[in-house]
Amino acid sequence: MVGAIEVRTKSPMKACSATVAMLIAMAVAPNRLSACSLAGCAGDGIELRRTFAVRVTHDSKPLAGVSVTVREFGKEEVVLKTTDLHGTALFANLSPGAYWLNSDLLGISAGSQCFHVAGSPSAKAKGKITYDWGDLAPSVRQASGRLVESEPRPDGTPLQRVLHPVDVPISGVKLKLTNPLTGALFEISSETDGRFSFGEIPQGTYVLRIEGQGAGNKFDFDTTDLVVKFGPSAKLDQLSLEAAPSGCGGKWVALRDQRP
């Protein structure tokens, strides 16, 4: 019987297992899942069979169109597969070695995993990995909000300037909402006061892309992808977004902690 491992990674911003060390910022994760670096893998990760399947779900349903890549440590070649209508991507006849597996949809990570393939598979070797995509996305009632960057206030003592910063609106930034299930796309730009609104959109889970470079003004941040759910029963009314250091030597946009 083919073994299976359930690796549930409902947040694109969290590492997928204890063996993976990833520096990721959202949403949502910009790319909010784009990881800024991958560290070494303790013990070469889990053991997989030479032929194994990766299954990706969303809201407990199979998710098609997810890109899944496998790269052997120390090599440039990448094996790319895309999940089918059953949410599955099959990798066959991998050579013995240590590998990284990464999966994402519209810039949002479904999961990442370091693993190894043994010359003679042990009884612990698995034949399946399952990830959840975007199931812990923040829920918001309205497809609107404000984009700002926090800066030291212009007056007061040096300590007061740092402890009591002011919000500076970021205008002219392109924002795109994409529904990964229907393909629906909505595009707008932030206003002078940093506010934005997509108006009435169908409820569901979307990927929000905030284009970097701030329309030629002083604000400079990396393009960020966040996954967000919109629906009338959400606790949050709007999105409060802030450009902040990413931990990777740059900036990207994060959803601010906020009370309903």
Image: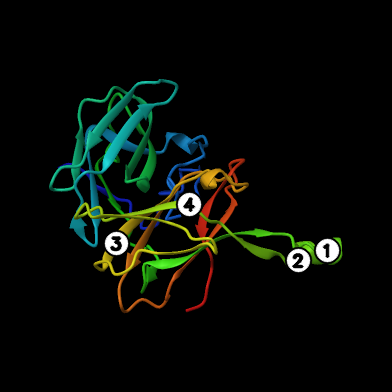
Label 4: element kind = loop
Q: What residue is pinned by disc 3?
A: 205
Give me the residue at 52% from left, 46% from top.
215
Quarter of the figure that contains the N terminus: top left
Q: What residue is pinned by disc 4?
A: 173
Q: What residue type is labelled 3?
A: Thr
Q: Nearer the viewer, mark 3 or mark 4?
A: 4
160 with respect to 206 (left or right): right
Label 3: element kind = strand
Q: Do the residues labelled 3 and 4 touch (CB within 8 Å)?
A: no
Judge whether 187 appears above or below 42 on screen. Answer: below
Q: Nearer the viewer, mark 4 or mark 1?
A: 4
Q: Looking at the image, tell me whether mark 4 or mark 2 is earlier in sequence order.
A: 2
Q: What residue type is labelled 2?
A: Leu
Q: How crowded is mark 3: few (under 14 residues within 10 Å), some or many (20 or more)?
A: many
Q: Are marks 2 and 1 in contact (CB under 8 Å)?
A: yes
Q: What residue is pinned by disc 2?
A: 163
Label 2: element kind = helix
Q: How crowded is mark 2: few (under 14 residues within 10 Å), some or many (20 or more)?
A: few
Residue 93, percent from left and from top: 21, 25
Q: What residue is pinned by disc 1?
A: 159
Q: Are marks 2 and 3 in contact (CB under 8 Å)?
A: no
Q: Which amino acid does label 4 sit on?
A: Val
Residue 154, percent from left and from top: 78, 62
Q: Which amino acid does label 1 sit on?
A: Leu
Farthest front residue in view: 192
Residue 207, percent from left and from top: 34, 54
Whole-angstrom CA distance, mark 4 to mark 2, is 27 Å
73 or 139: nearer the eye? 139
111 or 226: nearer the eye? 226
Farthest right residue in view: 157
Q: Residues within 10 Å of mark 4 (few under 14, many from 20)?
A: many
